[in-house]
Amino acid sequence: MYERLNQFIIWYYKRYKEWKYYDSSGLLDVENGPLVYYLADDGDNKVFAKDCYLLDIRSAYPTLVNFLYEKDIEKREFLKTLNSIKDKLAKNIYISTNLSSEELKMLGRLAKFVIVSFVLEIAREFDTDIKILELKKDGVLIKTDDQNVLILLDQLIGDDWYTKFNNFYTEFLRFVGIRIKVEKIARYLRVDKTSYYLNGTFDIKGLRKTAPSYLAEVRERIVNDENIEVLYQDLQKYYNKKTAMLLEFLNKRDEISRYYLINNTTILSPYKATPIKYTPGMLSKHEFTPWFYITTFISPVIYLVRTK
């Protein structure tokens, strides 16, 4: 495994060692570089972008496992069984339960290396810079203003990207069996260790993904162009200290859960990065801040859909 991995990495490093954008993001470092990276988190900032592109490796782990172990006699039965499995999830489960933690770690690093080097290859082809907004295992979210790159990325959407972008490196990827999926994301926001994606469908990943059920509904209503000013009037009714204390005094558990509880067990605290366990009486305490729910769960969604 390590011999084939090193051959692949050393080959790429030698090829692009003198290139001015070589490893400009610092993400190609197989040994020490991060497996997960967010540009916004790197500087504890907010990052908003329109017309981004999500690139990931199709069937990443099964493909890379076959590449790494095809000459390994001891892995012959392992590969035979793996390739007989049809379901994608079942394949990944089989890999995760039959490889060592060290092997899985190196597999993840190789997946990262392949997808990052593919992005840098596009940047090299057009002698431009491409900003990596997110890196997650076998996928990257990127942003560029280079019109030639934008045209290419639009052409790469689909399964026939080898015919649209073909050079020595992509020929090598095709030989290995790697296929890259490209998807366009209309709007993207990363803030408070949470990513918001809008592209026909609305998706949230990260720390603030799960909200109280009422606020989860409000998020969807905002994305569906419901009047935000009217929604704010409703929010003001429920997210104030008086209402919170009254609901708790009357022991309105269902309402408390709907408006304030996350997963029916925790509440937000402005003094803690993660939610804290709820016990009766906490909503009446001085440090409980109802409007913090709006700035945490709703304001980012408004920013996502309204920013020009």
Image (cartoon, helix red, strand yellow):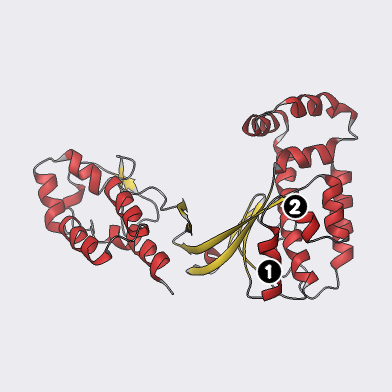
* 185 horizontally vs 81: left or right: left
Q: Residues within 10 Å of mark 2 (few under 14, many from 20)?
A: few
Is residue 206 in view from this perspective? no
- The earlier-in-sequence mark between 1 and 2 is 1
* 8 horizontally vs 90: left or right: right
Q: Secondary structure at mark 2?
A: loop
Amino acid carrying label 2: it is Asp
Q: Nearer the viewer, residue 109 or 307?
A: 307
Can you tell which quarter of the image residue 162 is in?
Answer: bottom right
Q: Position of residue 183 (x, y in %)?
A: 61, 56
Can you tell which quarter of the image residue 167 is in?
Answer: bottom right
Residue drawn at x 56%, y 67% as measured from the top left: 51
Q: Position of residue 92 (x, y in %)?
A: 66, 34
Q: Position of residue 69 (x, y in %)?
A: 84, 36
Residue drawn at x 75%, y 66% as measured from the top left: 122
Amino acid carrying label 1: it is Ile
Residue drawn at x 75%, y 55% as measured from the top left: 161
Report if the CB atoms under discs 1 and 2 are less than 8 Å apart.
no
Give the numbered dot on residue 160. 2
Q: Position of residue 208 (x, y in %)?
A: 41, 53
Q: Nearer the viewer, residue 272 or 145?
A: 145
Residue drawn at x 36%, y 56% as measured from the top left: 272
The C terminus lies in which quarter of the figure? bottom left
Give the numbered dot on residue 151. 1
* 270 horizontally vs 138: left or right: left
